[in-house]
Image (spheres, coloured by chain):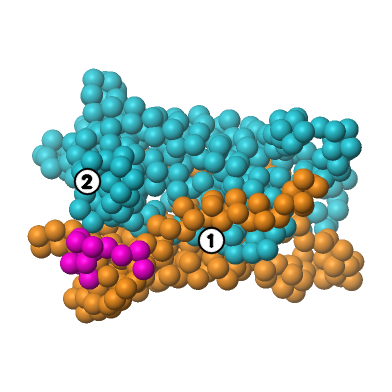
Chain colours: A orange, B cyan
Amino acid sequence: MTARAERPWLRTLIVVALLIPIAFPLYWALVASLTSEAALFSDPSIWPADPILSHYRALFANRDFWTPVRNSLVVAGVTTVFCVAVGSLAAYALARLEFRGKALILGFILAVSMFPQISIVSPLYLLLRGMRLINTYPGLIMPYMTFAMPLTVWLLVGYFRQLPKDLEEAALVDGASRLVAFVKIIIPLAMPGLATTAILTFIYCWNEFLFALSFTLGPERQTVPVAIALFRGEYQVPWGEILAASVVATAPVAAIVLIFQRRIVQGLTSGAVKG
Amino acid sequence: MSARADPRLTQDRRLAFAFVTPAVSVIALIAIFPLLWTLWNSLHLQDLRMPWLGHPFIGLDNYAELARDPRFWSSLGHTLFFTVVTVSLELVLGLIIALAMNSTFRGRGFARATSLLPWAIPTVVAALLWRFMFDSQAGIANALLVAIGVLERPMVWFIEATTAWIPVILSDVWKTTPFVAILLLAGLQNIDRTLYEAAEVDGASAWWRLWHITIPLLKPTIFVALIFRTLDAFRVFDLLYALTGGGPGTATEPIALYTHTIILQHLRFGYGSALSVVVFVITFGLALIYIRGLGLRLSGEER
């Protein structure tokens, strides 16, 4: 549009003005995590005037923050790999094969993805307690699949639909079975889509809170968000360490977002815009 | 139908069955079965603090108690208030950001990545950042408001319901507006550019183009964003757990947090199940509208 093209600096200015409030809280958390608690309460500075690492040291030395980081990596990692593996099969069938009840299954998966998690907390708790899985990795991975599986299937159906049909059809004409065509042609073609789906699923699992809070009992199996939310100080809120932990919890997802932003945007919007 | 005779189609159907079954049974086992169990439990007394009472069938007694429970009604009210306020703010601000970012300019990738960050971080972390910024002593909000003269002295935000809602709403708007903006931006990029060019040739103002081209054509995307956000806001839990804990007292407690307290602190699984069913029914009603809206476009795309 010409009006806009004439004043590119104005647009840049508007965008910068909108980005400042978006970025500032994250920047401030980073600066404050490097500031001593005394300075934080008396004379906080917008710039990291005298950065210290003592909050990070306390976080890993005194609070053993490695344990929640490890727990989160295990739970989110296993859930993601399992859901992408199983979900990609279902998504391929739903996107490319003709069979009865397809629309019904798609609707069912979409409906489950919108479940309020709280509505299944009590039976899942009783179920996991009965199986002695409270406070274990499987006891988190299983509940995580309730939201991760519908998410992966839904995203992958979108990707498989976009793939060109010609190569697959050619292989079928040459006498390859569907299964061979899927493994040899579709999977390699869909690699970028599988990666994006894995990234999004991992982020959702990394950030999950309600199930992790409900189905763990102590620090040995708590995930990162639960550990941070339950930080307690002896006399007051240990802000320095909370902020340091927040930076640690944010760093991996921030890195993923900055590296893969184009793909993440595609993944987030493909389901919503194209249907 | 000749489909029955075609070996390829039979083979396809078998493969489809084999491929779909694992995912669907996982979902059924860990989502649908527990949901039915919740429904069943909501008709029973189950209090793990008093196991000697057993697990008797009590009909709709849990629902009757719920109807008389003031804390249920107020938590429902808080949830609705939170949903309406945050979703409307997020849609308006999201549209503004999307419009501003809808063109090529230097650093666009960077702008988009930055605006994705609040969406990507754990909600608990976002809540704690805002609690820190609104802390009565170390909070930068107080420092800023005192400096520009809005406040005379630092204020304790979380001690009163009216002021506690401010950081709650700001933090949710901060965290999810970028997501809304990115959805809307994708919708904007699907609009045919020639429409704008034609309108400009006819001398239409930017305002006219917004109201007569952009908004009508963006309606489906706006609708999707609206429903996504409504469902998400209605089940709000993490944000309020970490930001206010539902307090002061229970003045900002949402329904998901109340349900969680009933189940995992009071151990009243029967009554908690009745609360869960209510949350589910409301969400499901909203989701049905969504599937109906989306389903139309799904079938349109396939043909």
Give the amino acid at mark 1.
Thr
- Give the residue at x 37% y 33%: B79
Q: In this figure, what is the number of numbered marks? A: 2
Q: Note whether A21 is above or below B47 in the view shown.
A: below
Q: Which residue is mark 2?
A: B154
Of mark 1 and mark 2, the one earlier in the sequence is: 1
Toward which corner of the image does residue B69 lie, by quadrant? Answer: top left
Residue B111 point in image, percent of width and height = 59, 60
Q: Within 10 Å of the Cα at label 1, are there few (<14), some (14-19), or many (20+) other Cα atoms?
A: many
Residue A65 point in image, percent of width and height = 27, 73
Residue toward you, B12 or A56: A56
Residue toward you, B217 or B104: B104
Q: Within 10 Å of the Cα at label 2, are there few (<14), some (14-19), or many (20+) other Cα atoms?
A: some
Residue B33 point in image, percent of width and height = 42, 44
- Give the residue at x 67% y 56%: A9
Q: Is residue A114 left or right of residue A53?
A: right
- Give the residue at x 77% y 51%: A6
Q: Is residue A95 visible?
A: no
Q: Which residue is mark 1?
A: B114
Magenta residues?
A: A36-47
Q: Note whether B254 is above or below B238 in the view shown.
A: above
Q: Nearer the viewer, mark 1 or mark 2?
A: 2
